[in-house]
Amino acid sequence: MKLRIVVDPDLCIGAASCVTVAPDTFVMNLENKAEVLDHGADMGAPTYERIVEIAESELENIITAAQSCPTLAITVFDEEGKQLYPST
């Protein structure tokens, strides 16, 4: 399955809870803002928005990482563009 994961750098305060929960998906940049990784695939540098291919078993962990953000800076969408987190 594919997810579109977006980090709003204006909301990110560098708590790094997302990195603790899902280190294969999130990393902190030099500005202490979370960015999205592509699970080790050679797709260039981390970015604030990325479409990632994940196993169904990884979905809960990525949602938990987004939920751990104290400022709701992470938004997760499914393949059809439906917002999975935060719930609308």
Image: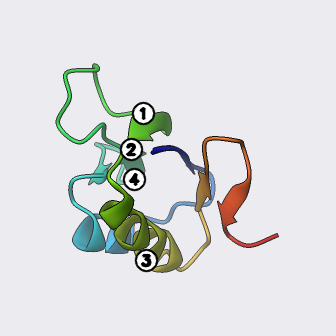
Q: Secondary structure at mark 1?
A: loop
Marks 2/1: CA–CA distance: 5 Å
- Residue on which the image places disc 4: 34
What residue did someone put label 3 on?
64
Mark 4, other Cα within 10 Å: few <14 / some 14–19 / many ≥20: many
Residue type at mark 2 is Val
Q: Are marks 2 and 1 in contact (CB under 8 Å)?
A: yes
Residues at circles 2 and 3 in contact by the CB criterion of under 8 Å: no
For discs 3 and 1, the disc positioned in front in the rendered view: 3
The residue to which callout 1 is attached is 47
Q: Residues within 10 Å of mark 2 (few under 14, many from 20)?
A: many
Q: Of callouts 3 and 1, which one flags the residue occurring earlier in the amino acid sequence? A: 1
Tag 3's secondary structure?
helix
Spatial CA span between label 2 and label 4: 7 Å
Q: Is the residue under label 4 in contact with that under label 2 (CB below 8 Å)?
A: yes
Residue placed at 33% from the left, 33% from the top? 46
Q: Which residue is mark 2?
A: 36
- Amino acid type at circle 1 is Thr
Asked if 69 appears above or below 27 in the picture, the reply is below
Structural distance between the alpha carbons of marks 4 and 1: 9 Å
**Image-based side of 42 in relation to 6, left or right:** left
